[in-house]
Amino acid sequence: MRLFQTATASFLSLSLIAAPVYSQSIDRAAALIREQDIRADITFLASDELAGRNTTSREDRIATEYIAAEFMRLGLKPMGDNGTYFQNMDIVSGEVDKENTAMTATIDGADHRYQFSQDFQWVRQSLRPGKVCGPVVFAGYGIDAPEYGYNDFANIDVKGKIALIFIREPQANDAASKFMGALDTYHAFQWQKLEELRKRGAAGILLVQDRLPRVIKPIPPTSPRPASTTSYALAGEMWDIPAFLVKREIADQLLAPSGKKTDDLQAAIDRTLQPASLEIPQSSVCMTKALTGLETRQGRNVIALLEGSNPKLKSQTIIVTAHHDHMGVSDGHIYHGADDNASGVAGILGVARALVHGNIRPKRSVLFISYDAEERIFLGSYFYVTHPVVPINQTVATVNLDMIGRDENDANWPTPVDHNSNMVNVLGTRYNPALRRVIDRENKTEKLKLDYKMDAVDPDSLWSRSDHFWFATMHIPQVEFQTGLHPDYHTENDSADRINYPKTTRIVRLVFRSVADLADSNETIPFIAAGAPVAPEQ
């Protein structure tokens, strides 16, 4: 059996070498992306038998075996651990022990004890139990953004201290903001703030509840959404810092010895765009993280490489990604995850098949990654960017596919007459307008309606909610294709029979064309860290 597999792999590798003229093959290769193949991939991955592919579950591992087998069939180079297609990582699961998770403070010599859920709430973080104590320091928004000339840490040392910070970023919701207008930059999101403060040595983080909640219209689900209280985290250093969300009145208590209040500090920062960080020596806080049912299991990314054909350019890489995990089973409901994200996995497999079966050998290399634990706030993609298999500084761009199978039905956006049956959202080109030009150019053949609306207004914060996010924090060009939210999102009705297969097929063809264009180009894609979204070429 091993001899047969070796011979097959060798034959496929030779077929890759015998590539016809590149520019004459793209249309033929795109036609090899077939609706029946995409349907087959999604039907298998979203079947009852795969039980929603919950992170680290047996069914999740079956899904990764399926993806790896397809990469092997194509003769792609395994880029995982020990010559396999699998990049392994330890993932911890457990539940918050509400009785013993605690927050206390000493303010001007007086002791205070706060109530879980009433005064403070749990924020996503590592699942390492423990207790930290330290003096409180107010650190503004917890942001260091040199591209905007703004740094909350310029005149403050947070090492060993409890950092009190605002959520989001200065001048949020202000269309005239020096940041990115009313659009949140990557600095605004708490998963980035936690990492920033962890790296600076803070002992703990208290995020201040926002003054006014964001106006987001809820999407009524067609069936119950998961009710599990289980938390997941990487076993390593990611977010390994206690973090609680506190009410503004609690933050004002901690600030009282300084004579400052949250509303005044926030208004001053937003008005002047100048940090107002300060020590509060008469305030100290202790934070206790308690958990139950802790268990460490193995998750894994699936990674494969199509090596570029140009001796000089093959060290540069285009990364094509999706996530294979979903929500599993909860209260007897199977969360099939056909759109989220069997559709994306079918997409990256479709791109890989078109490149190989179409004998397309671009100059640059193309790396395919199927991530684990995206539903747990992108654990697999964080693990990858901190354990890359190709140099991060040689990554030209990453193209992420997450939910490319449905027609958008989101109360935050008007629904057109065609019910979005020909539309795909493209997110992230606000940082990478050169990527938008490539996608627009390649879409002249597929003629999809490309919707860039979330590069200007993003009420659901969808740009920040998938695996491309970590690449943006590293100033690596990134873009996501997705077809928007709908009432079946994270319900048992996200099933294979509800996918718009003709549209999904055309989206995958567009992604293939865009990836082939990028991979065969000498063009550098700049990451534009500051400034307003760039208008498309006319």
Image (spheres, rainbow, N blue to C red):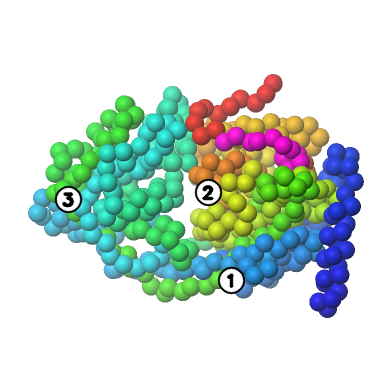
* Main SS, magenta residues: loop
Q: State whether residue 409 is above or below residue 305.
A: above
Determine which quarter of the picture holds residue 110: bottom left
Which region is colored magenta? 517-527
Image quadrant for the C terminus?
top right
Look at the numbered disc 2 and give the secondary structure of its residue.
helix
Q: Is residue 241 left or right of residue 17?
A: left
Report helix, strand or loop for mark 3.
Answer: strand
Asked whether residue 95 is drawn in magenta, I would say no
- Disc marking residue 57: 1
Q: Mark 3 sits on what residue?
A: 283
Mark 2 or mark 3: which comes first in sequence? 3
Label 1 vs 3, first from the N-terminus: 1
- The answer to whether residue 416 is left or right of residue 208 is right
Residue 65 position in % (x across, y down): 70, 69
- Rendered image: mark on residue 157: none
Distance CA(mark 2)–CA(mark 1):
25 Å
Tag in front: 2 or 1: 2
- Seen from the viewer's position, the closer of residues 12 and 510 is 12
The residue most toward the bottom is 1
Whether residue 344 appears in this view of the structure is: no
The answer, for residue 461, to whether it is visible in the render is: yes
Disc 2 versus disc 3: distance between alpha carbons?
Answer: 34 Å
Q: Quadrant of the N terminus?
A: bottom right
**Whole-number angstrom distance, CA of label 1 to CA of label 3:** 44 Å
Residue 40 position within the rendered picture, expressed as x and y whole percent measured from the top left: 78, 60
Pointer 2: what residue?
470
Please tell me whether mark 1 sits on a helix, a strand or a loop.
Answer: loop
Q: Amino acid at mark 1?
A: Ser
